[in-house]
Image (tube, rainbow, N blue to C red):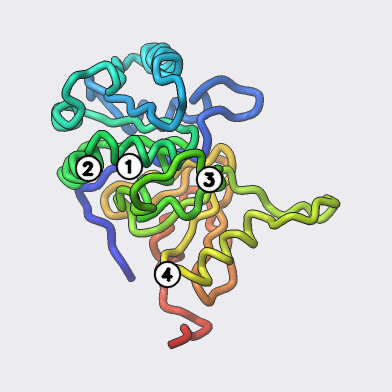
């Protein structure tokens, strides 16, 4: 079974807004518990077009939680800002745009180094996907073309956020999210976590713990998908020995 560096701390959120609530309301308790007393949070807003509007929204919400937040686009030396941050929050939007911004501002290396050293990383939606090895499990349109699909690689699995189960009553004939994930696994080795709305992954002390009210759907190459229960460590489900027999 693969392992995750014990120093790594990540909170990977499927969605920033849940039906019936406000921005990050459903994740507030987890964020408070995860951040603790760390004071200096840096926002990476590159997944949206208007960084200023997004930053103002995030700053208000983090202020309500008792944390200060500064958007990295307001700082003259972005890599240094990552080096000096207590926490990094990478917000949602378009994953291609987000990853392109990380490349354009030379931030992949600094973020990788700081997370490897123990800096807490919070990602929401697109911000959760770029914590994975690649952006290949995004559902977003490629509105821009980043230099590579390679993302931060902070965890050794993929996330498919906003996961929707197939609707047997629907007349829509397009591909389901499950079908798209299975197509990914026809070409790639990394397991995929189908993370439903309201769900969160907390990566800490070598465990990947599912938080929130829902199960998560786990996809592995050559295996049938399985459901992981809330509160459980997903590592054994993601990397347990094959029961079907991998193809050579």
Compared across the picture, whether 26 is left or right of 124 comes to right
Residue 80 in the image: state x and y as whole percent.
14, 28
Q: Nearer the viewer, residue 64 or 151?
A: 151
Sequence order check: which comes first, mark 1 or mark 4? 1
Quarter holding the C terminus is bottom left
Rendered position, 59 above or below 91: above
The reply to whether the C-beta atoms of the residues labelled 2 and 3 are less than 8 Å apart is no
Image depth: mark 1 or mark 3 in front:
3
Q: Which circle's residue, 2 or 4, is located before the other in the chain?
A: 2
Residue that badge 4 annotates: 189
Crowding around mark 2 (Cα neighbors within 10 Å: few <14, some 14 to 19, many 20+) is some
Q: Nearer the viewer, residue 45 or 148?
A: 148
* 102 or 41, nearer to the observer: 102
Would residue 159 appear left or right of 100 to someone viewing this image? right
> In what element is the residue under mark 2?
helix
Across and down, in percent, residue 170 comes to 83, 50
Tell me if label 2 and label 1 are in contact, CB under 8 Å.
yes
Label located before the other in sequence (1 or 3): 1
Horizontal placement of 189 versus 183: left or right?
left
Circle 3 Cα neighbour tier, 10 Å, few/some/many (<14 / 14–19 / ≥20) = many
Taking the spot 50% from the left edge, 68% from the top edge, the residue there is 220
| Distance Cα–Cα, label 2 vs label 3 | 21 Å
Q: Position of residue 144 (x, y in %)?
A: 45, 40
According to the picture, the residue beneath numbered tag 1 turns out to be 10
Foreground mark, 2 or 1, reads 2
Q: Which residue is painted at 20% across and 27% down in the image? A: 78
Question: Which label was assigned to residue 161?
Answer: 3
């Amino acid at each position: 079974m693969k392992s995750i560096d014990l120093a790594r701390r990540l909170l990977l959120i499927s969605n920033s807004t849940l039906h019936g609530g406000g921005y990050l309301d459903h994740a507030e308790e987890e964020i408070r518990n995860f951040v603790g007393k760390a004071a200096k949070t840096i926002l990476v807003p590159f997944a949206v077009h208007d960084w200023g509007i997004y930053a103002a929204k995030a700053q208000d919400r983090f202020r309500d939680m008792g944390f200060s937040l500064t958007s990295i686009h307001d700082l003259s030396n972005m890599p240094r800002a990552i080096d000096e941050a207590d926490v990094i929050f990478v917000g949602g939007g378009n994953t291609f745009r987000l990853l392109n911004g990380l490349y354009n501002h030379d931030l992949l290396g600094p973020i990788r180094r700081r997370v490897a050293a123990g800096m807490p990383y919070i990602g929401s939606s697109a911000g959760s996907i770029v914590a994975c090895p690649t952006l290949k499990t995004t559902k977003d349109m490629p509105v821009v073309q980043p230099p590579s699909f390679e993302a931060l690689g902070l965890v050794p699995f993929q996330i498919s956020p906003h996961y929707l189960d197939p609707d047997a009553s629907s007349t829509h004939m397009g591909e389901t999210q499950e079908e798209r994930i299975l197509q990914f696994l026809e070409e790639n080795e990394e397991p995929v976590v189908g993370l439903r709305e309201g769900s969160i992954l907390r990566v800490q002390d070598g465990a990947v713990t599912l938080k929130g009210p829902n199960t998560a759907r786990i996809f592995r190459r050559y295996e049938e998908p399985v459901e992981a229960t809330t509160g459980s460590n997903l590592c054994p489900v993601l990397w347990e020995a094959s029961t079907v027999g991998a193809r050579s």
